[in-house]
Image (cartoon, grey):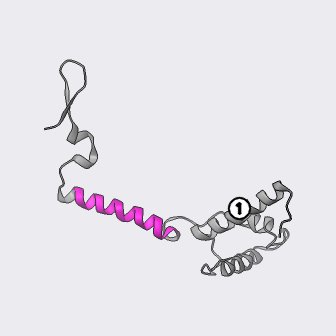
Amino acid sequence: MATIHTGSHNTFVDVRRTIPWTAPITRRRLRDLLSFAGGVLGAVFAAELVLPEADPDEVRGMLVELGRLDAAALPPARIEALRAFQAEKALPPDGAAYGRTVTELMRDVRERRELRELGLPVN
């Protein structure tokens, strides 16, 4: 048994009980670990299924800043502008602002702002 002396009145702590990955593997523990790993992998590879859609007002603001949407446009125009953006970026053109779409929008906005700060022409 691995123990650590805590320094107070000869008290020892069983390391296997304090460090999760050193605890004995039981069926329940294995199931919990696999469930956790599946959730992490699901979040990484299918973020659209885990994360909610982005705030429509924020998406609208990014599309306006990129010059893809008129500031006075009605909500249906936002969806069409988002579909066109998604098609250009080889994303599924569903008009919904989930993980990869928002990432691409934010990347384009950031690049545009950096160019503007440098005084370079913005397309």
* Quarter of the view holding residue 106: bottom right
54 to 26, vertically: above or below: below
Quarter of the picture containing the C terminus is: bottom right
Q: Which residue is labeled 1 in the image? A: 58
| Side of 55 where 49 appears, left or right | left
x and y, in percent, of residue 117 in the image: 82, 54
x and y, in percent, of residue 62 in the image: 74, 64
19 to 114, vertically: above or below: above
Query: Residue type at mark 1?
Result: Glu
Rendered residue at 69%/80% (across/down):
88
Which residue is nearer to you in this view: 79 or 87? 87
Rendered residue at 41%/61% (across/down):
40
Which residue is situated farthest in the left direction here? 1
* Quarter of the view holding residue 15: top left
| Side of 96 where 27 appears, left or right | left
Q: Is residue 37 visible?
A: yes
| Side of 1 where 71 appears, left or right | right
Q: Main secondary structure of the magenta part?
A: helix
Residue stretch rendered in magenta on the structure: 29-47
x and y, in percent, of residue 65 in the image: 80, 64
* Quarter of the view holding residue 10: top left
Which residue is situated farthest in the top direction here? 9
| Side of 120 where 32 appears, left or right | left
Rendered residue at 49%/70% (across/down):
49
Q: Is residue 43 magenta?
A: yes
Q: Is residue 56 visible?
A: no
95 to 5, vertically: above or below: below
Q: Is residue 33 magenta?
A: yes
